[in-house]
Amino acid sequence: TGTTLAPEIAGRVVVDEMVYRLPERTRRDVIDLDEAVVYVELPGTVRGQPDQRSPSLWSRTRIDVEVEVADNATLTASNARVEIAGNLSLFKPTGIEMPTLSGTLEVRGGYYEEFGKRFTIEEGEIFFYGTPEPNPGLHIVASHTVPDVEGAGDVDIRIVLTGTLKDPVIDLESTPSY
């Protein structure tokens, strides 16, 4: 809706089925191209004078879309499968380049393989705070039972993942303490 000078995208999107492949972890350093700056000098322009263009169509566009992620949504990696569902809001005011996501995705189940063991995901949430940089908060709990540990019996090991996607915190817990 809107006009050509002030377009608007609004509504609701239902994601009935989704599989998203998570990037694989590597130990290599990667150059973040979002941080790179490229300067181009156009013929006929004088250095130091700003280009007098009108705002782009994207810059003029306002977006307000509700996104419902249904039960059949999965995040996958070589060592994980995470089932998610929830509601998000995608918003971009006029004049702003990056849209924001806000809302919560519930982690419904799945698994995570680490330390040579498969951990079953018990519960969790992924929180989007409506900030320009998509760096959601995390709270995910996964467990694995090691049977018949000498002197302790069955030991339940839990991985608790908190923090954010870019700065995760992993805590290990066990019952009984081991």
Image (cartoon, rainbow, N blue to C red):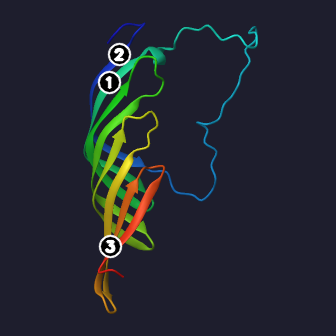
Looking at the image, is mark 1 or mark 2 earlier in the sequence?
2
Residue at 52% x, 57% y: name it. 25
Q: Which mark is residue 144?
A: 3
Whether residues under marks 1 and 2 lie with C-beta atoms below 8 angstroms apart, the answer is yes
Quarter of the image with the C terminus is bottom left
The outermost residue toward the bottom is: 151
Q: Which residue is mark 2?
A: 8
Real-space CA distance between mark 2 and mark 3, rounded to the nearest whole angstrom: 48 Å
- Does residue 110 appear left or right of residue 5 in this picture? left
- Does residue 11 appear left or right of residue 163 in this picture? left
Look at label 3 and name its amino acid.
Answer: His
Quarter of the image with the N terminus is top left
Q: Which residue is mark 1?
A: 64
70 is higher (above) or lower (below) than 152: above
Whether residues under marks 2 and 3 lie with C-beta atoms below 8 angstroms apart, the answer is no
Real-space CA distance between mark 1 and mark 2, rounded to the nearest whole angstrom: 8 Å
Q: x, y (%) of residue 55?
A: 52, 12
15 is higher (above) or lower (below) than 140: above
Q: x, y (%) of residue 113?
A: 41, 67
Residue at 66% x, 31% y: name it. 37
Image quarter of residue 77: bottom left
Real-space CA distance between mark 1 and mark 3, rounded to the nearest whole angstrom: 41 Å
Look at label 1 and name its amino acid.
Answer: Asp
Looking at the image, is mark 1 or mark 3 earlier in the sequence?
1
Q: x, y (%) of residue 53?
A: 59, 8
